[in-house]
Image: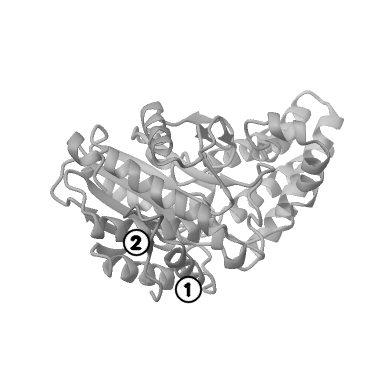
Amino acid sequence: MTHPPGPVDGSGRFATPDVLRDVVERLAPIPRLPTSAGEHEAAGIIRDLLSARGCTAVVEQVEAHHSYAWPIGLMSGLAAVSALAAGRGHRLLGTLGGAVAALGIADDITGTAMLCRRAALRPRLASNVVASTGDRTADRTLVVLAHHDAAPSGAVFDQRLSRWVADRHPGLIAAMSSNPPLWWPVVAAPALVSVGSLVRRPALRRAGLAAALLTLAAMLDIGRRPAVPGANDNLTGVAVLVALAEALQTRPLPGLRVLLVSAGAEEALQEGIRGFARGHFPELPADRTWFLTVDTVGSGRLVLLEGEGPLRVHDYDAGLKDLTATCARREQIPLTRGLRSHNSTDAAVPRRHGYPVATLVSLDEQKLIPHYHLDTDTPDHVDYACVARAARLVEAVARALAPDPALRGRR
């Protein structure tokens, strides 16, 4: 790294915009689809960056499936075939096929058993970076999560319609407390096929067929695309891990072990962190472990999500959210609350296992993530001041979790 952090306003605190930029610019040119060679290469670089800042860092390879597009496309194809069969008099096939497809998609996107992808895709290896810093002997642990793989693009991620609505209806955008539930129609399509076949309603069945074919086309498009640069999503989170490692090396934190985890295969619906869970959750007591997820924090406006979920939104732990918000006020970091997401991040996995979880993301003034899953998600479009604020906030949360009050305010 060529640009050391410099002091801000003579306070003795450090900001790291140049370091943050260096991390993002170094990794963005590497194509990092889930489970790919590029993902593994990036993991090695991140391990070295964290090791150079005093961490004990390793790359762990875990079994993972490489894509959500193919299993969901397969289930959508099943729904379409079932609808056509029902149209030729095979109502039972339409009813059962549509139901199986709807349940299969819901199972996959919520990370339950994920039966379709396990049956249809051969497992590969995702590369997780796991680094330990802080007080390695402490019995309290903060896990800071990011991911370094990058998503493929697709026509469904085009933001022109969203921008058009936001430009013409700012009041509507201001009133929104969550993004549109885009996974709902994906599940509804085969459900309509099933119900329409069962109750002899051709209009419902045809609507389900049309929606299933649209989903199939979208998934084929996504599944065949290369990786986007993924600078904001989520090399900004990786940069926060590096900045935190540097901060804790410069200003040690007794009483709290900090695990910095950059997961692979997040863009395959949290496959990498599931592997981390299998290997590490048994040794992380839920009453002494906290998870703070940092995902896409270079959009300009930091947001503390209240909860997430593709079908049903599950709120995160209130105590950790309130602690994070208190730290933001103390550090005079603007932080938006009250928003929920109908997508999913790596935070969904520890939340499901009963851990206190909080998630930091960022949005622009129109409550959108600029360049989300687009080829334009490049380093020059990242708001590095926003990333630096995220890094300061994560450090403040870590210090607030130290067991000795005398340590919590130490900088």
Label 2 sits on residue: 129
Give the CA distance from mark 1 to mark 2: 17 Å
Residue 182, x across and y down, in percent: 68, 40
Q: Nearer the viewer, residue 359 or 364?
A: 364
Residue 279 x, y percent position in the rendering: 28, 51
Asked whether disc 1 touches disc 2, contact meaning CB atoms under 8 Å apart, the reply is no
Tell me if 214 is positioned left or right of 219 in this view.
Answer: right
- The residue nearer to you, when weighing 248 against 180, is 248
In the foreground, 294 or 181: 294
Mark 1 residue type: Arg
Label 2 residue SS:
strand
Residue sitting farthest toward the bottom: 2
Q: Earlier in the sequence, mark 1 or mark 2?
A: 1
Q: Quadrant where the N terminus lies? A: bottom left
* Res. 26 mark: 1
Which of the numbered marks, if any, corresponds to residue 267? none
Looking at the image, the residue that sits furthest to the front is 10
Mark 1 crowdedness (10 Å alpha carbons): few <14, some 14-19, many ≥20: some
- On screen, residue 411 versus residue 265, left or right, reads left
Please state the horizontal and vertical placement of residue 170, each as a whole percent of the image: 77, 36
Q: Which residue ends up furthest to the left in the rendered image?
A: 137
Is 352 placed above or below 241 here?
above
Say if 101 sits above or below 48 in the image: above
Q: Is any atom of residue 325 visible in this view?
A: yes
The three-letter code of the residue at mark 2 reads Val
Number of marks in the image?
2
- In the image, 391: left or right of 260? right
Dot 1: element: helix
Above or below residue 91? Residue 33 is below
Query: Few, some or many C-alpha atoms within 10 Å of disc 2 (few <14, some 14-19, many ≥20)?
Result: many
Q: Is residue 91 visible to the viewer in this orientation of the structure?
A: no
